[in-house]
Amino acid sequence: MRVVLRKATLHLHTRAGDVRDDLPVLLFLHYFGGSGRSWIPVMDLLACGDFYCIAPDLRGFGESLATTDRARDYSVRSWSNDVVELTRFLALRRFVLVGHSMGGKIALMVAARAPAGLEAVVLVAPSPPTAEPMPAKERARLLEGYGDAAAARQTLRKITAQPLSRARVALAVEDNLRTSPAAWRAWLERGSREDISAKLNAVNAPVSIIVGGADETITASLVRREINARLRLHTVVHTIPNAGHLLPLEAPKATADFIERSVPFVNICAGVGSHGGVDQTIAAAAVR
């Protein structure tokens, strides 16, 4: 399904079981070079627990497109603008943002704007709100390797600690190769370096954080220093042992369990209207 926004057309991946009205919608934001379908192993598990799950392909990734595909069309702010606009378009009355890697930085930017209905944020191996500690050699390798399947597989090997099935490797490589060249360069050259740390003081929603114990870049100590220390509300960094950076693909069960445990910290006692309206809105937004 696709939703047409002011400056982008977003493709949405959804999962839903016997949706309960007392649970918020889970809105998933993916990692750099990925797409919303990287969350499907996690969403399949959470849908069994009655959650309604939505994972958009962010602008320039997967099947989503910017209205104009220029470098200036891609930034942490533009991606966050799309997410806020999407929540309004879908009329999400209550939702939890779940952001992985790049999606984690975008989730923090969205949370700082306190959109109506946001009840909590879950960060999964999040890119920091400050410049990501990426060696210049690795940044150059990624820039030069755009569109190359061998380079994409090399990146997968570098950032994972658990073996992936052939299907998940194929999915990750395909997503990597589908990324818009302008979006690819924009994140590596600007977005990953952008400093939005001053905005974290405006985050009022509770934040839960998990990282992979074998992730060599987004470590627990980095997250404590760059994120926890700047949040107004206390939070603890949890770890999935022996997992690398791609937690939704490497450890979907542990990741889903953590997300589900994080939701009860939200006030889920107040009754809300049926989630059926979300389905109708998405259907109405589908591009013919």
Image (cartoon, rainbow, N blue to C red):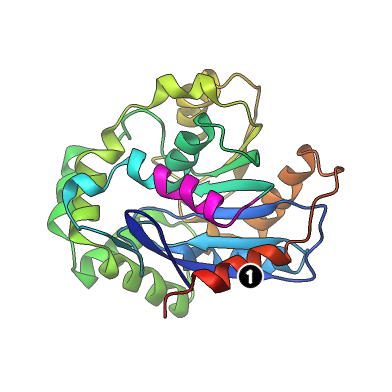
Q: Is 91 inside the magenta-drawn segment?
A: yes
Question: Residue 87 appears at what percent x and percent y?
Answer: 55, 50
Report the span colored magenta.
80-92
The quadrant in which residue 264 appears is: top right
Q: Position of residue 74 (x, y in %)?
A: 26, 47
**Is residue 256 at least partly visible in the picture?**
yes
- Residue 185 image position (x, y, % from top left): 19, 50
- The part of the image, by quadrant, that contains residue 139 is top left
Is 75 placed above or below 34 here? above
Q: Amino acid at mark 1?
A: Gln
Residue 138 visible to the viewer = no
Left or right of residue 70, residue 95 in this image: right
Height in image: 255 above or below 170?
Answer: above
**Main SS of the magenta segment?**
helix
Tell me the residue at 40%/30% (across/down).
Answer: 129
Disc 1 on helix, strand or loop? helix
Seen at 35% across and 68% down, the residue is: 175
Residue 232 position, x and y percent, is 60, 18
Residue matched to label 1? 280
Q: Quadrant of residue 3?
A: bottom left
236 drawn magenta: no
